[in-house]
Image (cartoon, rainbow, N blue to C red):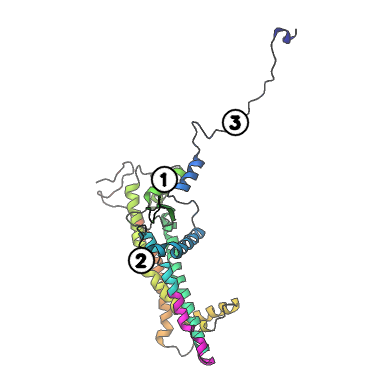
Amino acid sequence: MCVRCFGVKMQRITNPVAKPVPKTGYYIDKEKIKEEHAKNESHIPQKQGFLTNAKVYAHKLTNDVVTYFPKGFQGSKNSDFYEYLSMGIVPNLIGSFMLIYTSCGANKFFNAQDSASASKGAKMMGMGVVLFALGKWLHSKISNFGVKKSTDINLEQKYINKNAELPENGEKQGIVREQKPGVYDSVTFFRDDLLAYDGELNHGSRYYYKDKIAKKAGIDKPLNSPDQEINKRIRGVKARTTALQNIGKYIVAATCVALGSQEAFGEINFRSLKSIKNSFKKGFKQFLGEGKDRSFIHKHAGKALLGLSVVSTLLSWLIPVIAFKQKPDTLKTQLDPNKETEVC
């Protein structure tokens, strides 16, 4: 019997194809939220590291010259403490340039022998300036790296601050500028709010960072409310590390300046890698007191400075970490992971 005779239309049955989950309606487009948040709100960038820090430094230097200094001289009501701290880069660069220039700027007025002597001094001064900055930078980097590996507190972590300025000079609406400070720049008021939101948005838990830090501190069980105990430890690490670095980095810098003042660097040719290598090799030997006709001080001063530099760098890492990992040993300060606050 023909089915069509009864007015029934046959259809081909196929397996249904799964449709993609819609990003509207009851579903939340999390990627869209992340995009809008990064565009309009203060946030912690996901990429952190050497390249990020280099971009931050370049951003500060550019804005120092183009924005921050002009605003300050004009008495802008929008000049703030972040800009004040950032402007320290320019005087340092100008001072470094002037130290080098004063050693060789008048060379053209000297005779050949005096000019050669002045050029030698300028090269030694230049190496001293470069090594001074490099020493301070390396000391902080090594110390912060050790602290991060031991505590999971990244003292170099940056965030992008959306700074809405007040209207001025006839503007109807203030400008929103980007600033790039550190999450832990302030000991007392570090950006705990941004850490919590970033943890919730990008890692599924507002306590993502705190739980990692707690684990490094030897707290095995998850804390119901880790803010109280972990924030206290974060502040302790930041305060101790900053204090020790403020001392240690100048010991390291003095060591680097002493290295740069060795006679070997007076003959360096910056256009030749071989010359640079040989100058460093010879200069380091001179710094350690090798060679004839060296006094007792010259023979041992370099070694002492180098030893102090190593010790100060290690202490700026170890002392904060030791205090961070110290466990409470009295009933009053013992930590109960099953309660939201400490036992009192």
How crowded is the residue under tag 3: few (<14 C-alpha within 10 Å), some, or many (20+)?
Answer: few
In percent of the image, x 52 and y 59: which residue is there? 51
Q: Amino acid at mark 1?
A: Tyr
Q: Which residue bears the numbered disc 1?
A: 197
Judging depth in this view, the residue of 81 and 113 nearest the camera is 81
Residue range in magenta is 95-114
- Asked if one can make out residue 306 in the rendered structure from this viewpoint, the answer is no
Q: Which residue bears the numbered disc 3?
A: 19
Q: Earlier in the sequence, mark 2 or mark 3?
A: 3
Q: Position of residue 189 (x, y in %)?
A: 33, 54
Which secondary structure lies at badge 1? Answer: helix
Q: Earlier in the sequence, mark 1 or mark 3?
A: 3
Report the Cα–Cα distance between label 2 and label 1: 31 Å
Q: Which mark is residue 244?
A: 2
Judging depth in this view, the residue of 119 and 293 nearest the camera is 119
Of labels 2 and 3, the one closer to you = 3
Q: Amino acid at mark 2?
A: Leu
